[in-house]
Amino acid sequence: MDLTRVDETIDKYQGDKSWLVMILQDVQEGYNYLPKESLLRVADRLDLPLSHVYRVATFYSSFSLQERGKHLIRLCDGTACHLRGGMNLRDEIARELNIQPGQTTGDKMFTLETVACLGACALAPVMTVGSKYFGKLTPEKLKSILSDFGKKAANAET
């Protein structure tokens, strides 16, 4: 595995271990997850125990040790979203993409996660795709959103 990105990221923060969370965020942005090899390199270069780096990487839900799709879908399962049909939407996404929460599509385009709260109860039911929020979702809106992201991905490849 090419760890050039990891080294560049560590150099960007001048090897300062107090920036560990930011370093891990930047590394994850480059690979779309935190590969084992990257954690080993970060620990080595920052002179930190691997157990410490791993503990930080597993503490924050924004980090992933599993490869994720290009588009991370986070579906809210908070009280407001749950009461307004959020789990029906989860089932719809699962059918449309043929994945369950925690899984990634075979083409590595989408990963589905359910989360306890997205902090947008007034928009319930709500989900994010990447950093973009989509609220007051219906099955029809959901299908349109997934289709749009699928088309954007297809266009980016050509």
Image (cartoon, rainbow, N blue to C red):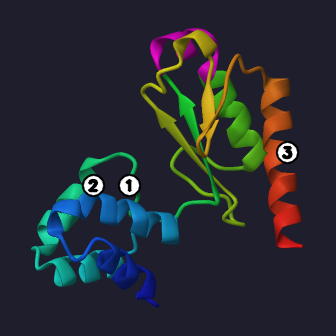
Secondary structure at badge 3 equals helix
Going by the numbered disc 3, the residue's amino acid type is Asp
Callouts 1 and 2 close, C-beta under 8 Å: yes
State whether residue 132 is above or below residue 80.
below
State whether residue 15 is above or below residue 54.
below
Residue 126 at x, y percent in the picture: 62, 24
- Earlier sequence position, callout 2 versus callout 3: 2
123 and 101: which one is in front? 123
Residue at the image position 19 percent from the left and 66 percent from the top = 53
Mark 2–mark 3 Cα distance, whole angstroms, equals 32 Å
115 and 91: which one is in front? 115
- Earlier sequence position, callout 1 versus callout 2: 2
Residue at the image position 13 percent from the left and 68 percent from the top = 51
Mark drawn on residue 148 = 3
State whether residue 141 is above or below residue 9.
above
The span shown in magenta is 78-86
Position of the N terminus by quadrant: bottom left
**Taking the image as drawn, is residue 33 in sight?**
no
141 and 13: which one is in front? 13
Circle 2 is placed at which residue position? 58
Lateral position of residue 46 relative to residue 70, left or right: left
Residue at the image position 28 percent from the left and 71 percent from the top = 13
Secondary structure at badge 2 equals helix
Going by the numbered disc 2, the residue's amino acid type is Thr
**Taking the image as drawn, is residue 119 in sight?**
yes
Mark 1–mark 3 Cα distance, whole angstroms, equals 26 Å
Circle 1 is placed at which residue position? 63
Residue 119 at x, y percent in the picture: 47, 22
